[in-house]
Image (cartoon, rainbow, N blue to C red):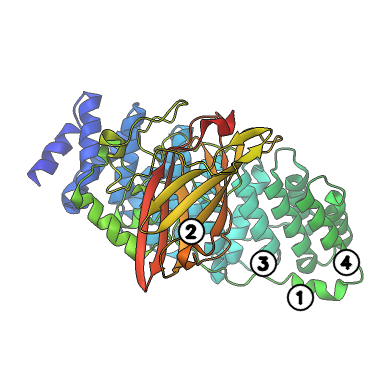
């Protein structure tokens, strides 16, 4: 406690480096002595107003670590004020964590809905998808507040339709509960006087606005279609609005428009049943599960290669072999099974997946020493490419296959292919073979790359690697490399061997640089 009090006094120091070190250290010890750090909450909150970006980032993370059921109202009020004034690079993380904190500690449903709607209108287009889905989920499961939430969202849409997340949630709610707003039966709220045409005017603005994204237009066209069973005197106008995108170049919009239009024809008898209100949406896990127990992202110099830091990671892997976060401790990885197009940065505050590793072009540095610091016990792979007898030919250039991993009878090989039309995209075919006398069951392959790349994993050919090298399990990996840098990949394999769960992991540093030349 004495040490925490000294660190608290450091927060008042004029030297910004001392303030940063104090915040960083408090962030480390908050789980060890939560109550002692909690006493300095007001000083930590004041650090949110510091002009230095690094200090504001650490103060924000520490504030979320200090949120609990007793201070949720006050802390959320301060963090909403910070969200309104902060730089754009903070808005995505702050809004997402606010939603998670409100979900965990909300004193009542109405406060919860008001808070998430405030987050949505304050963060604007910086809000992540999890904020949209969380608010829709929350409104769906709160029957008594359907009209209240929809009316407030509709008022917001009347004033502003440039914020895409707000438009998406608003359109969804108007489509589901527009009739509740029209009825005026809204608990503890003065109903607004609005006509069917006024509701459709707002939906039409969203539908045809040039700033609306394709996803927002999809929400709007579905909402308008649902209103055809909620409204009684605007069917002809609804049919015209639905038909707007029947010749759209966007396949999804065109398909929705054409299929919805067909429901007014020979399939009209099905329309009412198909457009009933959505059932309760199954609740997903929190977007940031680390917030619940005070976990925070660590800087690369915070990662320590000690037995104490490795042990909890190994225990976590045994509990959930599918958690890709275990590959890189608590550092957020590049997600798999996503669109390989370049991903917009959320502000540059996410750590590089491979810590401080140099991902510039050129040959990789030798393994060992500082290269593996912070990754626990990692099994390095052979640095020397093993060229197959028949290397795959792409665009007239031979790209040699490589041995990515070999241990305990399991061998992973990568072969490569590059399409002429996609110069930055490399298609890697993984081939897993097993020389053991028993098969490897429940085989799962996972991978992560630095944030300057994009990774997409397709479904594997199976879940069993046959014994005695009598067959191979294959899986396609797509890596987008916009800057044509040397690729470094972390991999992990989980499987069962004779009833015993096994986890192997390593690094692949020998992907040929010729793959992108």
Q: Earlier in the sequence, mark 3 or mark 4?
A: 3
Q: Earlier in the sequence, mark 2 or mark 3?
A: 3
Q: Any mark on residue 180, and which?
A: 3
Q: Any mark on residue 273, and which?
A: 1
Instruction: Name the residue beneath numbered marker 4.
Output: 264
Pointer 1 local density, CA inside 10 Å: few below 14, some 14–19, many at least 20: few
Is residue 393 or residue 2 the one in the foreground? 393
Q: Is the Cβ of the residue at disc 2 closer than 8 Å to that at disc 4?
A: no
Is residue 197 or residue 410 the one in the foreground? 410
Q: Earlier in the sequence, mark 4 or mark 1?
A: 4
Q: CA distance from mark 3 to mark 1?
A: 18 Å
Tell me what residue is drawn at x 51 percent, y 42 percent: 122
Tell me what residue is drawn at x 84 percent, y 53 percent: 241
Q: Is residue 117 visible?
A: yes
Which of the two marks, 2 or 4, is nearer to us in this view? Answer: 2
Q: Is the Cβ of the residue at disc 3 closer than 8 Å to that at disc 4?
A: no
- Identify the image quadrant of residue 233: bottom right
Q: CA distance from mark 2 to mark 3?
A: 60 Å
Q: Earlier in the sequence, mark 2 or mark 1?
A: 1
Pointer 3 local density, CA inside 10 Å: few below 14, some 14–19, many at least 20: some
**Element at label 1:** helix
Tell me what residue is drawn at x 29 percent, y 58 percent: 314
Instruction: Name the residue beneath numbered marker 2.
Output: 433
**Element at label 2:** strand
Pointer 4 local density, CA inside 10 Å: few below 14, some 14–19, many at least 20: some
Q: CA distance from mark 3 to mark 4?
A: 24 Å
Q: Is the Cβ of the residue at disc 4 closer than 8 Å to that at disc 1?
A: no
Q: Any mark on residue 136, and which?
A: none
- x%, y% of residue 201? 78, 50
Q: Is the Cβ of the residue at disc 3 closer than 8 Å to that at disc 1?
A: no
């Amino acid at each position: 406690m004495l040490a925490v009090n000294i660190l608290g006094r450091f927060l008042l120091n004029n030297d910004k480096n001392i303030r940063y070190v104090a915040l960083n250290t408090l962030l480390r010890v908050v789980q060890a002595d939560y109550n002692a750090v909690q006493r300095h909450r007001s000083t930590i909150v004041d650090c949110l107003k510091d002009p230095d970006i690094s200090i504001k980032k650490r103060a924000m993370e520490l504030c979320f670590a200090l949120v609990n059921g007793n201070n949720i109202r006050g802390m959320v009020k301060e963090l909403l004020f910070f969200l309104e004034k902060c730089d754009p690079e903070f808005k995505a993380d702050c809004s997402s964590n606010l939603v998670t904190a409100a979900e965990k500690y909300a004193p009542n449903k109405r406060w919860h809905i008001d808070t998430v709607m405030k987050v949505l209108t304050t963060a604007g287009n910086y809000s992540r998808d999890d904020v949209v889905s969380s608010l829709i989920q929350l409104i769906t499961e709160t029957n008594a507040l359907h009209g209240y939430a929809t009316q407030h969202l509709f008022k917001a849409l009347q004033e502003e339709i440039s914020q895409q997340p707000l438009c998406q949630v608003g359109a969804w709610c108007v489509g589901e509960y527009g009739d509740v707003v029209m009825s005026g039966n809204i608990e503890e709220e003065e109903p607004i006087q609005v006509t069917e045409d006024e509701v459709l005017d707002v939906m039409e603005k969203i539908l045809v606005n040039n700033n609306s994204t394709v996803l927002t237009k999809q929400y709007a066209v579905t909402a308008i279609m649902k209103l055809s069973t909620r409204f009684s005197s605007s069917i002809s106008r609804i049919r015209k609005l639905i038909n707007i995108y029947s010749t759209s170049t966007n396949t999804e919009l065109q398909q929705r428009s054409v299929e919805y239009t067909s429901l007014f024809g020979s399939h009209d008898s099905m329309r009412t049943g198909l457009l009933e209100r959505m059932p309760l949406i199954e609740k997903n896990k929190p977007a940031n599960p680390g917030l619940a127990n005070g976990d925070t992202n660590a800087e690369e110099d915070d990662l320590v290669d000690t037995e104490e830091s490795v042990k909890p990671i190994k225990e976590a892997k045994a509990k959930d072999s599918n958690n890709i976060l275990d590959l890189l401790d608590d550092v957020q990885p590049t997600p798999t099974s996503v669109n390989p197009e370049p991903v917009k940065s959320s502000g540059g505050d996410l750590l590089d997946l491979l810590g401080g590793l140099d991902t510039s072009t050129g040959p990789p540095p030798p393994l060992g020493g500082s290269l593996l610091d912070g990754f626990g016990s990692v099994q390095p792979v052979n640095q020397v490419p093993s060229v197959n007898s028949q290397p795959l030919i792409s665009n007239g250039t031979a790209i040699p296959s490589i041995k990515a991993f070999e241990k305990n009878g399991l061998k992973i090989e990568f072969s490569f292919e590059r399409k002429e039309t996609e110069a930055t995209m490399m298609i890697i075919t993984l081939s897993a073979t097993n020389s053991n006398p028993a098969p490897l069951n429940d085989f799962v392959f996972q991978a992560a790359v630095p944030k300057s790349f994009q990774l997409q994993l397709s479904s594997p050919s199976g879940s069993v690697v046959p014994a005695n090298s009598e067959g191979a399990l294959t899986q396609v990996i797509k890596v987008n490399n916009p800057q044509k840098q040397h690729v470094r990949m972390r991999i992990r394999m989980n499987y069962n061997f004779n009833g015993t769960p096994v986890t192997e992991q390593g690094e692949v540093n020998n992907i040929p640089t010729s793959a992108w030349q």
